[in-house]
Amino acid sequence: MTNLNTRPVTPICSAQDCDWNFDWILPARDGSQFLAHSDDLMERMTARKPGRTGFDPGAVELVLNLLTQDCATEAPEVVKLLIQLCHPRSRSLSSIMQVSPVTMKLLTRFGIRFKMVNVLDICRYYFKKRFSEEPLFTFGLAAKTEDIELSNQVIPLSLGFKKSEIQDSLGGPGLYHDYFTSWIQYRKSLIRLIQKDNPPSVDHKECKSKRKKFHSNLSKSLKVSPQHLFDDEWRLEQMDILRSKLNRCRECLQAYEVWLIELMRKATQLPSFESILREAFAAQARLESERYCIEEAEEYVQFQQYLDIYPAPGLWRP
Ligand SMILES: [Zn+2]
Ligand SMILES: [Zn+2]
C-alpha cells in the first residue's frame, strides 16, 4: 500500500462564501492533487455530519483513507468532479450535462461504493437525460439506487441486450436478482405476444398470386423483437421496406401497418416492468417475514424449554 500524503499545502478555499479550511488532499492517477474539505466528503458519504452523529474519529479516518486510495487510481477529471460535487457551494446541475458519460460512469462507481447519496442523485439526474445513449448502464444504476421510475423509463431500450449483459450491468450473477428475474419475465411476456400474433393473411387477390412467397415469408423477414415493440422509428423503417417490396400496394401496406400498430399497442397493455418488479419485491418481503416468523417461533420454543414456563392463554403459539 502506498503511503499517501493527505495533508493540504494551502488551507484557503477559493469557493465563494466558503470560510472552511482545506484539510484533505485527494490524489489522482496522474499525480495531480486536489484539495478538499474532509467534512464535505464525510457528509456526502453518510448524508450526515460526522460531528453530529458522533462518528468514531478512527472510522472517519479509515473511510477517508479508502476514498483517497481509490482516487489515486482514478483519472484527474473524476477526482476533480467528485470534490466539486461534494462542495456545497460549487454544485451546479446545468453544467453537469457537459461532462462525458465515461467520467460520469466512473463517478457513479464512487457514489455507489461510498454511498454518496447526493453524488448519486446527480448521477441519476444525468443518466435520466442520457438514458438512450447508455441504456445498459442506466438500467444498472436504476437497480443499484432502487429508482423504479428510472428503470421503467429505460426498460424498452434494455430489451435488445443479452441476459449476460443485463446481469453484468447489475454487477454480476445473483446481484439485484429481483431486477434480473423481472427483466426476464417481462421480456418473455413480450416474446410470447410476438409469437402468437402472426401477420395478417392476404386476401388481396392480385398480391396473393403475384407476391405469394413474399407474403408467406413476411413474419420471418420482419423479425420483430421485444425491443421493437416500443420503437416507432423501427416501425416507420419497416413500412419503408415493405413499401418497396410490395410495389406500393396500398391495400396490403395498410393491412400490415394496422397489424404492427396493433401489436405495439398490445405490448403496452401487458403488465409493465414496474408492476412485475413491485410484485417481486412484495414476494421477497413475504418470504422474509415468513422466515422471521419461523425464526421467532423457534426462539419461542427454545425460550419455553429453557425457562419451563407456559404461555399465557390467547398468546400466539408456534
Ligand atoms: Zn470550500
Ligand atoms: Zn396487395
Image (cartoon, grey):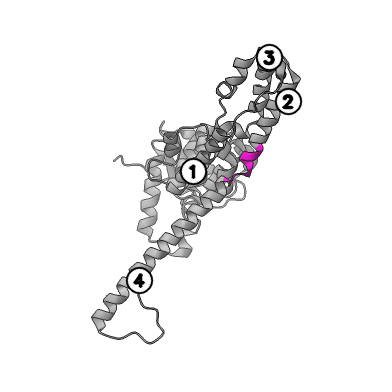
Main SS category, magenta section: helix
Residue designated by label 2: 254
Residue designated by label 4: 296
Q: Residue at x 73, y 17 (%)?
A: 249
> Residue 185 has which mark?
1
Residues in magenta, as a range: 265-272
> From the viewer's perspective, is the residue at label 3 or at label 2 nearer?
2
Foreground residue among 20 and 136: 136
Residue designated by label 3: 244
In the displayed structure, 315 sits above or below 61; it is below
**Residue type of the residue flagged with mark 1:** Gln
Separation of residues labelled 3 and 1 (CA atoms): 37 Å
**Residue type of the residue flagged with mark 4:** Glu
Give the mark, 3 or 2, whose residue is nearer the N terminus: 3
Give the mark, 2 or 1, whose residue is nearer the N terminus: 1
Q: Residues within 10 Å of mark 4 (few under 14, many from 20)?
A: few
Asked if the residues shown at circle 2 and circle 1 are in contact, with their CB atoms under 8 angstroms apart, the answer is no
Asked if the residues shown at circle 3 and circle 2 are in contact, with their CB atoms under 8 angstroms apart, the answer is no
- Image quarter for residue 239? top right
